Image (cartoon, helix red, strand yellow):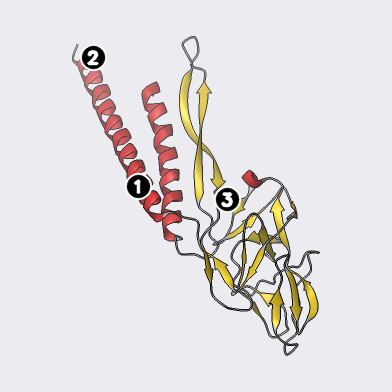
Amino acid sequence: MDNAIYATLSRQTGLMSQMSVVAQNIANASTTGFRAERVIFAEVLRGTGDGPSLSMGAARARQIVQSQGAIEMTGGPFDLAIEGEGFFVVEGEGGPRLTRAGRFLPNEAGDLVTPDGARVLDAGGAPLFVPQGAGPVAVGADGTVSAGGLPMGQVGVVVPRDPLGLRREAGARFDAPGGWDPAPAPRVLQGALEGSNVDPVAEVARMIEVQRAYEMGQSFLEREDDRVRKTIQSITVR
């Protein structure tokens, strides 16, 4: 296969991955705590024997955008938002997971949980218990939870040791294989939720840009295929 076709196909594959990420960002522009994602392209060099090396572009990694999303005041006593860096810690099937989505509520047992039932973990990694009927619930800026004026625990707010290593799971949750540490100065807001940090206008513009780039690459492949066919036909006729 011609080197030009190899290089273009590698670019087309990367553009397809980028389009998938952009579409996911747009679909979650209204998802609480959602973090936009970016595709990182890298140059890959391959030897071609005695001739010059072949340079190809490849979508090697994805990066989670860490910018702050808009904070909306809800007034809900168990709605929490983080201002600045940090993530809440919740239970997951494969171990604790990180999230910025702070829509929580107490279950029948008194554990603070997410809407799908995953328990929220405290600063020590244990489920956070808020007994029912203990009085008004207040959450301090450092995540300390009190009910009726008595401290019940502290919401875990952590920062991943390797932010570039975050791996997205369902919705707004992430796995942090590199582990995490307590946030040095967490600022938790009670009665508030953080929205998605996706910029819909920018994402739509990026989608159009990626689509045009893909169409240009496809057009080049079609012309190259036609050139090769005509060359083969010309050689065959001779």
For residue 173, side relative to residue 148 (left or right): left
The crowding category of the residue bearing disc 1, from other C-alpha atoms within 10 Å (few below 14, some 14 to 19, many at least 20), is: few
For residue 187, side relative to residue 146 (left or right): left
Q: Check the picture and name the quadrant holding the C terminus.
A: top left
Nearest the viewer among 20 and 114 is 114
Q: At numbered mark 1, what does the secondary structure look like: helix, strand or loop?
A: helix
Q: At numbered mark 2, what does the secondary structure look like: helix, strand or loop?
A: helix
Nearest the viewer among 224 and 207 is 207
Residue on which disc 2 sits: 235
Task: Report how far apart the C-alphas of labels 2 and 3 lie in the structure.
Answer: 57 Å
Query: Residue 223 in the image: x percent, y percent?
Result: 25, 28
The crowding category of the residue bearing disc 2, from other C-alpha atoms within 10 Å (few below 14, some 14 to 19, many at least 20), is: few
Closer to the observer: label 1 or label 2?
1
Residue on which disc 3 sits: 66
Closer to the observer: label 2 or label 3?
3
**The disc labelled 2 sits on which kind of residue?**
Ile
For residue 16, side relative to residue 234 (left or right): right
Residue 94 to residue 62: above or below: below
Residue on which disc 1 sits: 205
Residue contact between numbered discs 2 and 3, judged by CB atoms under 8 Å? no
Query: Residue 180 in the image: x percent, y percent?
Result: 74, 52
Task: Report how far apart the C-alphas of labels 1 and 2 lie in the structure.
Answer: 46 Å
Which is more N-terminal, label 3 or label 2? 3
Q: Residue furthest bottom?
A: 133
Residue at left offset 79%, top offset 69%: 126
Residue at left offset 41%, top offset 53%: 23
Q: How many marks?
A: 3
The answer to which image quadrant residue 79 occupies is bottom right
